[in-house]
Image (cartoon, rainbow, N blue to C red):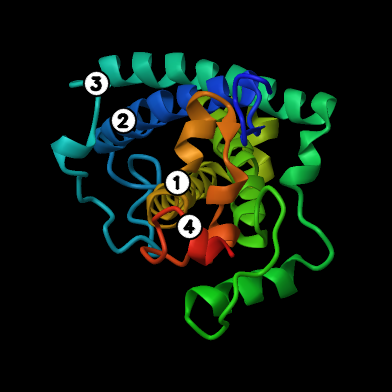
């Protein structure tokens, strides 16, 4: 602490490393997956007809959203990056468990109430920022759901990859078609959470970026100390406002 006056250690190097590996790997995983999807743009198998719940059935994803150039290349990237994400996720979850930091992300009894208060504050229905610890209730819900969605994506991906050999996994999702629905639905949900996460970092707490790079954080610049809503009160508090 001596070399960092006023700062607190917020993120361990393991959390930071796994976070930035995800930043690199997830776009590759998503882009290559969409390229694989374009080889057969439907949730059903060839010859099974269209899937009624997918109005875009048969329509390819634009090339600029895909990665891998061709089916074989996309499959190599997809499966290679998949194992990186699996190992990365296991390291992250294992560290949280062994280091005790799982308490920062698991849901708590009053999270529904606290999430409502945060939403009211963001909507200008509440004047003062609710009290929070390391993460507010909305953040905890997001950080808890991301590994859950990641596990669903991996399991459903395995079910799609080997629907016969690993049929005992496929049957967890009823059949191949529904495994693909869960795979894509979970992916879209993860992308949505990631986009919201990135937007809220820049819109509410850009100072947290330092803690994800160096590990150190200035509590004086927290959203609670600044009474910060999205794109509001982003500047550090002055002596007058601090008083």
Nearer mark to the viewer, of 3 and 2: 3
The label number, if any, that marks residue 182 in the structure image:
none
Q: Earlier in the sequence, mark 4 or mark 2?
A: 2
Q: Return the x and y of residue 113 as percentages of the image width and height.
A: 73, 75
Q: Tell me whether circle 3 and circle 2 mark residues in contact (CB < 8 Å).
A: yes
Label 1 environment density (alpha carbons within 10 Å; few <14, some 14–19, many ≥20): some
Residue of label 4: 237
Q: CA distance from mark 1 to mark 3?
A: 22 Å
Asked if residue 163 lies left or right of residue 131, the reply is left
Nearer mark to the viewer, of 4 and 2: 4
Q: Nearer the viewer, residue 119 or 179?
A: 119
* Residue 122 vertical placement versus 14 (above, below): below
Q: Return the x and y of residue 110 as percentages of the image width and height.
A: 80, 68
Q: Earlier in the sequence, mark 3 or mark 2?
A: 2
Q: Nearer the viewer, residue 143 or 59?
A: 143
Task: Describe the element under mark 1 as helix, strand or loop.
Answer: helix
Residue of label 2: 36
Q: Earlier in the sequence, mark 4 or mark 1?
A: 1
Residue of label 1: 194
Nearer mark to the viewer, of 3 and 4: 4
Quarter residue 78 falls in: top left
Q: Tell me whether circle 4 and circle 2 mark residues in contact (CB < 8 Å).
A: no
Q: Tell me whether circle 4 and circle 1 mark residues in contact (CB < 8 Å).
A: no
Is residue 174 visible from the viewing direction of this image?
Answer: no
Q: CA distance from mark 1 to mark 2?
A: 22 Å
Q: Tell me whether circle 3 and circle 4 mark residues in contact (CB < 8 Å).
A: no
The label number, if any, that marks residue 68 in the structure image:
3
Task: Describe the element under mark 2 as helix, strand or loop.
Answer: helix
């Amino acid at each position: 602490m001596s070399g960092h006056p006023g700062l607190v250690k917020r993120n361990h190097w393991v959390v930071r490393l796994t976070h930035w590996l995800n930043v690199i790997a997830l776009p590759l995983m998503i882009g290559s997956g969409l390229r694989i999807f374009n080889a057969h743009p439907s949730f059903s198998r060839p010859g099974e007809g269209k899937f009624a719940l997918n109005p875009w059935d048969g329509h390819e994803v634009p090339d600029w959203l895909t990665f891998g150039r061709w089916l074989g290349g996309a499959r190599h990237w997809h499966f290679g990056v998949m194992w990186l994400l699996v190992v990365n996720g296991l390291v992250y979850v294992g560290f949280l468990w062994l280091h005790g930091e799982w308490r920062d992300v698991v849901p708590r009894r009053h999270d529904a109430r606290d999430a409502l208060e945060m939403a009211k504050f963001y909507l200008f229905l509440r004047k003062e920022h609710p009290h929070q610890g390391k993460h507010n209730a909305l953040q905890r819900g997001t950080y808890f759901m991301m590994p859950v969605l990641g596990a669903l994506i991996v399991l459903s991906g395995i079910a799609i990859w080997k629907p016969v050999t690993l049929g005992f996994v496929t049957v967890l999702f009823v059949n191949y078609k529904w495994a693909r629905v869960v795979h894509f639905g979970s992916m879209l949900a993860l992308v949505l959470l990631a986009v919201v996460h990135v937007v809220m970092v820049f819109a509410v707490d850009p100072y947290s970026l330092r803690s994800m790079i160096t590990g150190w954080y200035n509590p004086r610049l927290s959203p609670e100390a600044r009474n910060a809503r999205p794109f509001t009160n982003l500047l550090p508090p002055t002596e007058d406002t601090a008083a």
